[in-house]
Image (cartoon, coloured by chain):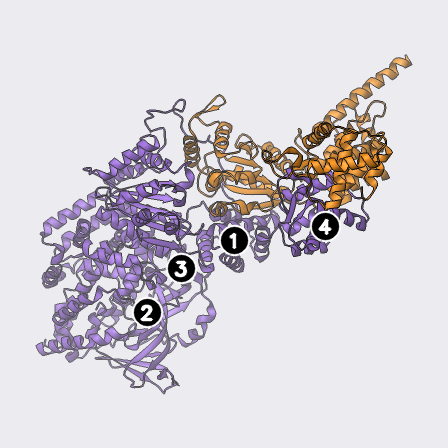
Amino acid sequence: MSRYSMRLRIKRTYELEGRQIGTDRKLKRHFYNTLKIKVDGRPEDAVVNVGDYIIIESDDDDNPYVAQLLKLFCDETRKVKKALVQWYVHYCEVPKNKKKLLGRAPHPQEIFYYNDPSCDSEVDAETILGKVEVKHIKVEAPFPETQTNNTLYVKLSWDTKTFKAIDMGLTKPWDTVTTPPKQGTQSPVVESPKSPPPSASSQRGPALRALPTPDPTVMRRASSTSSYTSRTMSTGKIRSREAESIHSASKLSASKLLSEKRRGRATSGPAVRKKLELSSPGKLIEEEMLSKLMDEELAKKVSSPTKTIELSISLVPLMDPRKSRRQEDEEEEAFPLEPLQSPDQPTAATLDSQDTTRDLHGPSDDEFVEEGVTRISAKTPQRKATPRRSNLRGPSRTPSRRKDLSSAFREPSLGVLEEAEHEHSPAEPAATPRSKRKSAQLVSGKILKQLDLLNDQEVDSDGGEEDLFVPSKIDLQSSSDEDGMNGSDDELVSRKSRRVSSSQTPRSTDKRRSSTRTPRKTPSKKAPPPAARTPRRATPSIPTRTLPARNPDNVLEEARARLHVSSVPESLPCREQEFQDIYNFVESKVIDGTGGCMYISGVPGTGKTATVHEVIRCLQQSAVQDEIPHFHFIEINGMKMTDPHQAYVQILQKLSNQKATADHAASLLEKRFSNPAPKKETTVLLVDELDLLWTRKQNVMYNLFDWPTRRHARLVVLTIANTMDLPERIMINRVASRLGLTRMSFQPYTFKQLQQIITSRLNRVKAFEEDALQLVSRKVAALSGDARRCLDICRRATEICEFSGGKQNGARLVGMSHVMEVLNEMFSSSYVTAIRCSSVQEQLFLRAVIAEFRRLGLEEATFQQVFVQHQALCRVEGLQPICVSEGLAVCQRLGACRLLLLEPSGLDLLLRVRLNVSQDDVLYALKAD
Amino acid sequence: MSKRKSRETHMLLGECLSQAQKILRRRFCHQDVPAMPAGLDSQHKHLLELLRRTAVHGESNSVLIVGPRGSGKTMLLSYVLRELLEEKDVNKNVLQVHLNGLLQTDDRIALKEITRQLNLENVVGDKVFGSFAENLAFLLEALKKGNRSSSRPVFFILDEFDLFAHHKNQTLLYNLLDVSQSAQAPVAVVGLTCRLDVLELLEKRVKSRFSHRQIHLLSALTFRQYLEVVCTQLSLPSDFPDSRFSEEWNNSVRKLTEDKSVEDVLQKHFNISKDFRSLHVLLLLALSRVTTSSPAIQPTDLVEARRLCAADYKANILHGLSILELCLIIAMKHLNEIYEGEPFNFQMVYNEFKKFISRKSRSIHNFEKPVVMKAFEHLQQLELVKPMEASTTKIQREYQLMKLLLDHSQIMESLQRYPQCPTDVKQWAASAFA
């Protein structure tokens, strides 16, 4: 269990205090107001009241969770104490790909109100560590300049999708309750400062042996990963967070199984080994490795985006409060709260000091050691049972935990380490979420930066640490033997350095070149035109413009540009699960060097093609970074070819720049995919609008799905179409069978998703009222769930807003009225207006049609019959009757705009007339006149 | 001296008249770029802004202009385009492609036409090289290589947009609209159609790519506004060379529209249709009656023009028939009355005709059957009668079922006006039963 940490060495006793304030009979709960935490060796107890902000232990000791205590209760037996909390998150807990949504650099002390109903807000009261001070600040207000770093600030809320201003009503009432007295139990510290000798010595054994814990890389890895994957409480949780979406975690998708399966395999893969080497540290001599890492870090720093730098900065001050606290109470066992300072030196330092203090306090006693260990192990199950925010646990979890337990008997802290490794390192290459991959570097960069800083501060503590490190190293080695880690330190280092150099420029440029080769845009100029029938070597291009395009110059124009469907968003919101599944699928195939087919369906405008493109972009990125083998991406679109057999020609052209006729191309491709070749990259083929590749014999589709099954093909085919049951409907059996069962369907967007899509596109450009957005997204979700439609409506709304408001006020917001206008424009049927705007005789003719229908009792009549009615009506209305030719002209005009449905006009008088609008609509339109 | 002078002014008048007629004819025949259409201010603004954004900002757009025939769709568009091209930063910065669904009847032709109009590099002279597939790939590649900021915006103007929707797979529409929704060369796809239900023709993936902007040109003109339109349409522009003449002309036009009989005529015309095109036809007919002897449009001219416009074509045809043919038509009319619109064959008509000859006719002598047959076939050629089924091979011609394509009112009306129609024939036609 990863949350086994040193803090277990402190014995805390929790007591519910005060009188019982309420009982829930149904749930058999007794509610209390106050929790007293008694820590061994401290004179006074920490008292936590309902409404206080608390810190709760996490796997990452340095970064405990912050929450607000809402309720305290226990069950009948009074044994199990629970607390209901409102969570807050640190910036580092926000998934990385969402971080940019904040749109500014976070304050180091900033936390976010966590608004996610799916998150379990009930925790075991015994995980509460203490109180912390939290202040709510208005969104516009600046962060107060304080030197004391114990206070955390809240400005925004985070609902797993967006940052929002907090509804102050939610938190206000408690604000009064907080503002704790600024002494004694102030701030995070709850553990009593003094540990009496016996308990100290009881801690001592494990502590001593636990000293090696801070194997830097592992800890760093663990801590940083968990800090990045928002609050990870259990492995299951971690994994689900890695999947980057809460809702995705709740679905057990095929990809999960896939990744699970691959996990086993991938551990032996070369790429993985590299990762493991990186993360399983025991081998490295610290100094050497540090310097190496720092070098690498420096190299990275030059090129790394500013964001990562900001990140690292934001992380640093987190340790300060605790450090100051530590200074406050020297002997205190601050380990569990050890901040994010990458654990090597600082922890070593503290351990050192702790050791000495403890030595001073009392003799080390073996008995105590035993006692400590057993206590810990005894405690384990209980801990396990504490409810966590999300109960999802990967099935593969159990064995490793068992191992951990056994090792925990030996060395609890080591268990932590091992666990951490088990959880993170294999997951790294195998579990594959893109965040992971992309993050791998960032994360290590983050850590290293911190390391850097720390290095400056506390260089001297290095020596002690190294000593302490030795024992754990052996253990780790044994535990990670399976990873084939038996190279010497030197070797590792050298490999390391190789990697460093490789990640630098020369290779990457090389990669870039090769990635540009992936031929989405192979200009036909480059093609050697053997049979170019075009005169000269024509380059397809549109002439360039003489004047540069103007850039948007007010908010509404800016918003409009962002809302255009074509503007590619930084990340695609709302399709995390699908993204993950496709990513896993393609990545696994690329890594294995095998082939496969996948069928993706969904109504238009649900992001199918965009998601696939994003997947490919991510994969290409990681290919450039050498994390996966290189591959070739080809895209064809059934709509963009004149004939299904052209698919061969286009594939061949994009694959090898050859031109050939369809038949020839087919045979060339056949050869290519069935014969082994020495250096063959995997080819990823995206077939959009698959249904248009249908032919009578279906040989195009057959081939497309047959090639991936060849042994040497290394072809991954992703197909996209609109209908879910396309394989069943139009494919003959042998084709459908080859397509296989890997299917995915994109559901139409719900209104919440649409809203999120708009907000993420707008990205803090304030152009819309909240209600207006909601109206648009609800309307579209109700009609089609088509994101394109949604964006188009918003775009039109900005136009209407701009022109209705006149020129001078640039800071207008698009409101409900504008949106309503657009919706009317786009969705209202124009028939009624058309009838109202038609001429007198046309209206009369429509009435004649209805009169004739009523007379006949049919919905169809000939022109001659209607015309008789028409002339009668003319007389009634006092108009001069029109002649037949004019009557026919009137009728034809109505037919042309499809108010009437007519037969071809050759039939003249006998032409049959039907209404294309309901009779009620016609009567309504005519009556309103 | 005085004689010469008067001749001079006369000459001048004739010149002025022909000049005026030339200007107005060009206006009515849509050869000039039209003036700002009346009553379409918001639509005009919408379209102008949309196209300007494409031209200036490089924002891709798609829009449909929907309105009944003759409501001024093309007029509006060409007015907007002219206005745009007058702007400095738009001029020479845009490319235009004009397609018409009636001309480009399939995607192959349309693609060639696009390539030709864009003058891409596979065009030599007026010829476009390459197969259909190559052309498509070439065009798409060209558009794909463009981007928002650097390549010239292209206006695709698709007249009779609904006909493009009938092309196979709607490939052209899909690709154009797809370009307009992706980060490629900026395009504006403008469709013109008179079908209100045009969106239902689009396939769903094509529909999804269309921005759903529709500009409806449904004129809500009142008769007063209509009269004003007539007035402005007939008026000469201020830059007319002879100002005195143009003033006189414009005054006469104003007087004309105030005339009661003209108002009646125009009201009738307005009742039938509000569209501008039929109005132009009417005015053109009136205009062509202007001569030097009557150097302004008279109310009678308009009345006469209206009479021409409103003439019943079939009744006109009846005027040119022989008595025998007319008799056959009358016989068919009676048959229609007897059998309540059921089809008839030649034999029945012939029998009816014989009955008439034997009983009532004094002026018409008996015709041989082949002669009558010949007359009947002539009627069929004129499409006054129509066979029920197309296949004529199996049935003998005499017994083939036919239908009359004339209304009773048409027959009676033309009989009244038929020159020297025998009275007994007239009586026969008027009698309820033969």
| Residue neighbourhood size for the residue with mark 4, other residues' Cα within 10 Å, grouped as few (<14), some (14–19), many (≥20) | many
Among the chains, which one is purple?
A
Query: In which quadrant is the N terminus of chain A drawn?
Result: bottom left
Mark 3 in CB contact with mark 2 (< 8 angstroms): no
Element class at badge 3: loop
User: Which residue matches tag 2?
Assistant: A389
User: Which residue matches tag 4?
Assistant: A848
Which mark is on residue A786?
none
Q: Are marks 2 and 4 on the same chain?
A: yes
Which mark is on residue A161?
3
User: Which residue matches tag 1?
Assistant: A767
Mark 1 in CB contact with mark 4 (< 8 angstroms): no
Among the chains, which one is orange?
B
Q: Are marks 3 and 1 on the same chain?
A: yes
Image depth: mark 1 or mark 4 in front: 4
Question: Furthest-right residue in view?
Answer: B2
Q: Are marks 3 and 2 on the same chain?
A: yes
| Residue neighbourhood size for the residue with mark 1, other residues' Cα within 10 Å, grouped as few (<14), some (14–19), many (≥20) | many
Mark 2 in CB contact with mark 1 (< 8 angstroms): no
Element class at badge 1: loop
First-in-chain label (3 vs 2): 3
Q: Is residue B128 toward the left or the right of residue A368 in the image?
A: right
Tell me the kind of residue under disc 1: Ala
Image depth: mark 2 or mark 1 in front: 2
